[in-house]
Structures are given as C-alpha cells and as structure tokens.
Amino acid sequence: MQDNATEVTAAGIARLAGVGRAAVSNWRRRHADFPQPVGGTETSPSFALAEVEGWLREHGKLAEVPLRERVWQQLAGHPAGPVTALTHVGCVLLLIHDRPPLWLNASAGSDARLAAMLPEALEQVLTPRFGPARRGRGGRWGGEGTRAAGASAAVNTPSEAGASAAVHTQPVATADHTQPAVTTVHAQSGAATVHTQPAVTTSTTVNSSPTVHDSPTVHDSPTVHSPVAKPRTPSAPAPPAPALDTLTGPALLPSAPLLRGAAELASELGARQTFEFLLGRHLDANPRQYTLTPADLAGLMADLAGPAGTVLDPACGTGALLRAAAPDGPAPRPEQADQRLHAQDAAPDLAALTGLRLALHTRAGIRAAAGDTLRADAFPELRADAVLCHPPFNERNWGHDELAYDARWEYGFPARTESELAWVQHALARLRDGGTAVLLMPPAAASRRSGRRVRADLLRRGALRAVVALPVGAAPPYNIALHLWVLRRPDKAPAQPEVLLADVGQFAGEGRGGPDWRAVRDAVLDAWRDFDGAGRLDERPGLARSLPVIALLDDDVDLSPARHLPPPAAADGAGRLTDVRERLGETLRLTADLTPAPAHDPGQPAPRWPLTTVGELVRGGALVVRTGTHGGHARVPVLTDHDVLSGTGPSGTLPESDEEPVLTEPGDVVVPVLGGGSVARVVDDATAGAALGRNLVLLRPDPVALDPWFLAGFLRGTANNRQASSYASTATRLDVRRLQLPRLPLDAQHRYGARFRALDEFDRALKRAGRLGDQLVRGMYDGLTDGSVTPD
C-alpha cells in the first residue's frame, strides 16, 4: 500500500519503458485503462508508481522494472521530496554498512514494524557517527542543548560495530548567546567515548539566509547557489544548524518500500555504491540546482594540498573535495591513518548528505556542520593541515557590514565585491602554521582593483604561493578559464619570496569534452613540486615560471598568469604550423578524391518501399536499444553528443558513480536525441570501447538482419527526423523508436550501406579540413604577431 505514495511523472514513465514522452502521451489518449493522475498539475501530472508498473507489465511494455530504476523512481517521487528520501536511504545504508544484523532484524516483517523498529536501530549507528540525538520538540542528532542554540551537527569518528557510546555533552554560554556544541567521538578499545566542545564563537552580527554553495564531483562534484534572503535580525547570527533530524517511525513509514528496495540494491552493488548511484542521479536530475565539479579537478586540488591528517572544506556541498582527500574504503593509507575531515555548508540538506556520504566512503573521523561559514564558523579553534574549498563566486551578501572587525582579516578587510578574498582569508585562518590551502577562484579575483591591497599583503607575507590558470571547460562556468590558488600559512617570512604562475590552458579539449586532465595534472603537479622543493622555478615557456614578489607589487598587483608568462618557443610554434599545413593539404586532396559522383536519373520517381520503424525492429529482436548513462565507475573515454555531431573522437568524462556505463562496439549506430540535427554515426574500431554519453541512444543491429551503414544512412534523412521529433519552446527531442527505414533484403541493404559509408567518409574529411584550416589561420595570426613567423 505504501508503494502508492510514490509518484512518477510522464518523463519517469518514459524512462521506465524506454520510450519517448510522446509515446506516453499516446498511451494516455488511446488506452482507457491507463492510470489516472494522482498529483502534479494539469500540464505536468504525476501518477502512482505501483499503478504505472502494473499497467506497463500488463500491456507488455516491459517485462520487469529494473531494480535501479524502480528504486530511483521511488526516491524521486517520495511524498516528502527526494532530498528527504535520500537522507532516509543514506541512514539505512549506513546501518546496513555498519550493523547489518540490526537491519535484517528490523526488516523481517511488515512496513509498519520496520518503521517502528528503525529509529532505535538507527540510533545505535548514527549516535556513534553523529553524536547523541536531542530529544523532544524537533529533536536532532548533534548534541544535547543544540536545539536552543541552533547547534551544528557533527559526523564523528566511527566506533567499531556493536560498540557502546559514553556521551558527555556541555553547552557553553557566552556573553552573546549559548554556543552550539559539536560532538567528537573517539574510538577506544571497542567503545566510543563522546566529548562535546564549543563549536562556534561569533560576535553579535546580522545574519541572513546564506547563498548555498556546493563543490563536489558528480562523480559527482556539485555547486549550489540559492537566493539570498533579507537579514532576519540585527542582534545575532544564526549558529550552525544540526545536520540530521531525528528519524521517527511516522516519518519513516512512507519510505519503507524505498528502503527495502535500496537494501536489495545494496546487496548487489554495496551500500556505498548504492548511495553514490542515487545521489548522482539526484544531482543530474536537478542541473539548475547543482553544478557538478569534475572529479579530476577535485583530485588535482587534493594532490596540490598533499597528504594531510586534518582537512577542512568550509563550503563542502556534497563533499567531493573531501572525498578526494580521504582514504578510500576501510583501510586508510599509512600517512592518513588518523585523518579527520571537517565539513561545513550553509545548506542543512547538503551538510547531512555530505556526512552520510563521507561516513560510507571512509573510516576517517568526520565532523560536519550546517551554517553560514563566514558568519557562523563551526570550527573556530581548528588548525587544519589542509583546506580545500570551492567558494561561491560573486557573492555580495557575504557579511561585509557585520564582519568588519573579524579577526580573520589578517591580510586586509575584503571589499564588498571581493567575497572570494574573504574565503581565502578564512581558509588561511583555519590552517596550522605551514598548512596548505587550495581554492578554486574566478579569474577576476587575480586582477580586480578592489582586491589589490589584500593580494599585495598575501604576497608580501608569503601566504600566496601559486596561481594556476586552468583550461576553459575545467569546471562551471565552462566558458571561463578558472584559477587555482595555492596558499600556505606562513610559519616564517621567506627571505626572497617568489610566486609560481602557471597556465595550462593549452590542454583544453575540443567542444564540451573537457580538458586533457592527464596532461593538466602532470604539468601542474610537476611545476608545483619543483617550485615547492626549491622555492623557485626556471622558465617553462608558455607554461610556468616563478617571479619574485617584488616584481608583482605594482599599482595593479595583477596575478593573472597569462600576463607574466613568456610565449612558447618560436621554433616549436613554427614547427606545429608546418605540420598543420601538411595535414591540411593531405586532407584537402583526400576530400577531392571522396567527392560523390553525380546522381543518375534525377527525374526517376521515388520508390514505394514497405516501411518499418526502429521500435518494431526492437520488438522483433533485430535491434537492441541502449541509452547513455549519467555516470560510471569505469575510467574510459566517453563519446559525447558533441563528438557525434562534430565527427571527432571520444572526448568526454562521466561523473564518478557506480552505475554501469554502456560501452560501444564496432557496428553500433549512435544517434543524438537533442538539437534537431539529422545525425547518426556508426562506431568503428577506433571508437569501440568508449562509454556512451548523455543524450545519446545506441542501436545495436543484428548483423544477419540489418546492415549498420544502411540503418545509419536512412536514420539521417531530414524528413525521417522531422516526423520523429517533438518540439518545445527551446529544444527539439528525437524519439528514436519512431524513425523509419525501408524493409529491404540484406543484399540491397549492403549496396545502400556502401554508398552511405562513402558519404560519411567524405563528410568527416570535410570537417577535418575545416578544423585544420582554423588551426592554420589562428596559428599564422599568432605567429605573425609574436614574431615567430616573418611576413616574407
């Protein structure tokens, strides 16, 4: 009965059945027994998932709903919302991970029994990890007395399975208000001793609802920006809030079918992998709320910081940066055996999800808090070995008026428009002497005049050690080349300080595939390690150099690497231009040879073939249809929709998750479903083995029934695409199953296929010539202007 509480939209039904949304609309019109809407709106109704599953199965639209899809639809349609559902699932997966017998006992019965027993079972796992729960009105995990003070919840060092917890909690009063408590758990000989200490020390300031920022991965690394509310009161800031609500039986009852499904999925994938899959799907389903930060970037930032025992992310989001810095699995690396992770985020939902995610990911000690970091720091006494942070950019309401006399502004009070420099100084304030901070920064922060005094003091005192310009497309916003700032809290003033400036923009990838992360990683880490060891770096033309601080202390204090790096060696530039010119000549000659012959009998009437559709061929077994996944654990190149449209090789990456990627094989036909173009690409040996990206559909023909080039050629017909497309105000979507092709014997298919294959080769040669021509023109302009090419 509880299954009926889960609702699914028309888009979800289409995903369950593997069809387009137009097919779902047709079913609603043609079948009187199609389930009636139970919610939503007139233009976007929702349906009971259990009723939809039954109808699809009864009408042969699917044999069985895949377990992953069923669990996801239950989560997405949860009555309390997907974030609440994901939190419930995360708590139960942690129970399965840490204390599986407790789950087996609680789940052996009805949904009502499960919901009644879960709170006590969860408390035995969540208390050692998160601290004791506050009982009473709106109680939460996070320490006694935290409700009145708005305390921060903490995710703590896990105790061994079955360990008991001795809890000591003391709220601390100050002249301003009662400080929230942050709970820490120390594992000792199988028992967990919990101590609570003050979490926040703040002056009387104005607090407003903060802008929420997330910096994970997707595998998943998200950034969140939420509207900023007006200040609530001029008397005191809101201290960090608890990360997790107390889970009660009535609250858990609607989640019972979802929790059973998640447990079943965990038996196949594992608890951690199940949570990563569901979290990744949630982030991907809400692209306007979450902007994923590539896992490769998070890994690079963690490597720049180096191995660290105590790590802080003050704008943690869903914890991608801390995941990159944490040991993977139950056995930490030797240098991180006693590692402790500290996380804070302005969004309570993200703080809770981060705590659960990290608890499932690592056995390191974890403390997580929800609250506005700049206004209500949860860890004022922390002195971390490393700080990793992707702060919110261009934030005007960061606390400029309230925090004018804050002790963190050691390097100068940031201007109202320089919120990023406030985050830089917060990171430095939370470092131990000699500790390292790595922040992702907008390029404007290196050159805006309003921040020049703070930048100058960071340089003079030796705190700013490196500025690295990343390639375009490294992280959102993808049209801007962001910077990495590497800072170190000075333990002593350097005698002759220098700063590393590097620019790896040359490693940008084509289109939306992202940069060449291996080349970026090698170049940045090699330059940083050489500089960090010697205190200086010899010039690497076009890539990196170190400059004395005095050379940068002019009126602008402009730290943009491109303004200070020497251009690439002229000989190398001229050599590349010669190579491009030779390749262009070969391509143009090949294009001329591949030009199609004139068409014969232009007045001949079009043949009247019997037609079939892709959907009919799928039902008949002549075709297999697969869609691109939203993530994957395999580190393989990804064929993106841009690659298919432009005719280039696989250039993308998948967000890290435990979803199984769809790998291409020779003879597969790949079709983009967005954009309205008439494009179909046959996978060759060079592309085979790549993972299928988003917004792509793969058709795998049975070679005894269909010629792949015949299939791809007819799918590219303009009229064929027009009749199979649906149109919205800003986009066109192709329903691949409605595409038509003639019923022809295999020998006739081969003749058409050979002609289509020749046309495709000609098309690719033209595109390759265009790209080489663009490179040659741009290189000549650059060479003539920088002196590496003479006009004679």
Image (spheres, rainbow, N blue to C red):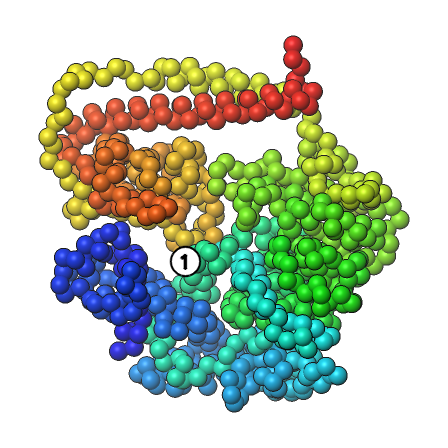
Q: Position of residue 616 (x, y in %)?
A: 16, 46
The percent coordinates of residue 543 (x first, y second) are 68, 36
User: Would residue 63 appear left or right of 93 to someone viewing this image?
Assistant: left
Please tell me which residue is depicted at 65% across the width and 46% down the height of the picture: 443
Q: Nearer the viewer, residue 310 or 337?
A: 310
> In which quadrant will I find the N terminus?
bottom left
Please say if 27 is above or below 159: above
Placement of 193 over or under 664, stated as above or below:
below
Tell which residue pokes out farthest to the top in this image: 792
How crowded pointer 1 is (Cα within 10 Å; few <14, some 14-19, many 20+) is rated as few
**Res. 781 image quadrant:** top right
Residue at 17% in and 16% down: 601
Q: Residue at x 58, y 76 (%)?
A: 241
Q: Which residue is mark 1?
A: 285
Q: Is residue 517 left or right of residue 200?
A: left
Residue at disc 1, secondary structure: helix
Q: Is 119 in front, or is 477?
A: 477
In screen coordinates, is 62 left or right of 215?
left
Residue 779 locus on image (x, y percent): 59, 23
On the question of residue 267 being in view, the answer is: no
Horizontal and vertical percent position of residue 63: 20, 60
Q: Is residue 361 above or below residue 483?
A: below
Instruction: Single out the residue that lies furthest toward the bottom.
Output: 136
